[in-house]
Image (spheres, rainbow, N blue to C red):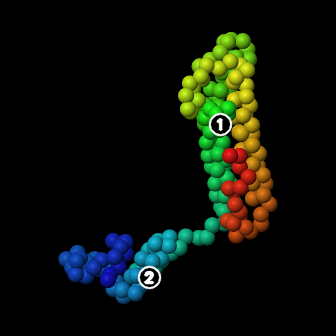
Amino acid sequence: MLYSQSKQGFLDAVINKDGIPSDAIEITTAQYTQLLTDQSAGAKIQADAKGFPVAVFPPAPTFADVKANKLADLAAKRFAVETAGTTVGGSIIKTDRESQAQLNSALTALQGGMIPDTPWKAANGWAVVTLAQIQPIAQAVATRVRACFAQEKVHSDAINALTTIDAIKAYDITTGWPV
């Protein structure tokens, strides 16, 4: 097996016999196998000062990187739970951001007396709802959203109190969420 710095890759002497660059260096099968193993583990294969292929692993993530990634995962978890929907009185209520906004708009219009009722589309069908009927739905959604943000804060505070990379990596962000 050969490695060429100019081609930034491996060449087979039989397959590539007519196009082997002058900088090609012969390596053993064991070296080739190890380089591919290292590449599969995240290393980049590049030439050293003499043109020999070496595996270069990226630097280990810093404490700040690991914490930032965990907090980003936490925010994604909160958003997924927040927008997963909820059930109120047998109706499946969507809780994505658009549905939250529509619910707020309908609640405000009903509270202000602008309309007496409104057609409402739940995930499992239509209903015409009045202020008295939409208030428990809005309250359930608001309670769910509040609980999601509160749980994110609990986890965020706990993560921010951790002092080692291993502790942050081991921290479980999947507990305590509303169902």
Q: Quadrant of residue 87?
A: top right
From what the image shows, is residue 109 above or below residue 150? above
Q: Which mark is residue 87?
A: 1
The answer to whether residue 52 is visible is: no
Q: Do the CB atoms of the residues marked 2 and 1 lie less than 8 Å apart?
A: no
Tell whether 49 sits left or right of 133: left
Q: Quadrant of the N terminus?
A: bottom left
Q: Residue at x 70, y 60 (%)?
A: 172
Task: State the count of labels.
Answer: 2
Q: Quadrant of residue 5?
A: bottom left
Q: Give x and y (percent) for residue 144.
A: 71, 39
Q: Which mark is residue 34?
A: 2
> Which kind of residue does numbered mark 2 sit on?
Gln
Q: Earlier in the sequence, mark 2 or mark 1?
A: 2
- Mark-to-mark CA distance, 2 and 1: 54 Å
Q: Which mark is residue 12?
A: none
Q: Give x and y (percent) for residue 62.
A: 66, 66
Outermost residue, left direction?
A: 18
Q: Give x and y (percent) for residue 138.
A: 71, 29
Tell whether 49 sits left or right of 158: left
Between 114 and 12, which is closer to the camera in this rendering? Answer: 114
Q: Quadrant of residue 132?
A: top right
Between 2 and 164, which is closer to the camera in this rendering? Answer: 164
> Which kind of residue does numbered mark 1 sit on?
Thr
SS at badge 1: strand
**Neighbourhood count class around disc 1 (C-alpha, 10 Å): few under 14, some 14–19, many 20 upward:** some
From what the image shows, is residue 95 above or below residue 65? above
SS at badge 2: helix
**Neighbourhood count class around disc 2 (C-alpha, 10 Å): few under 14, some 14–19, many 20 upward:** some
Q: Residue at x 45, y 73 (%)?
A: 39
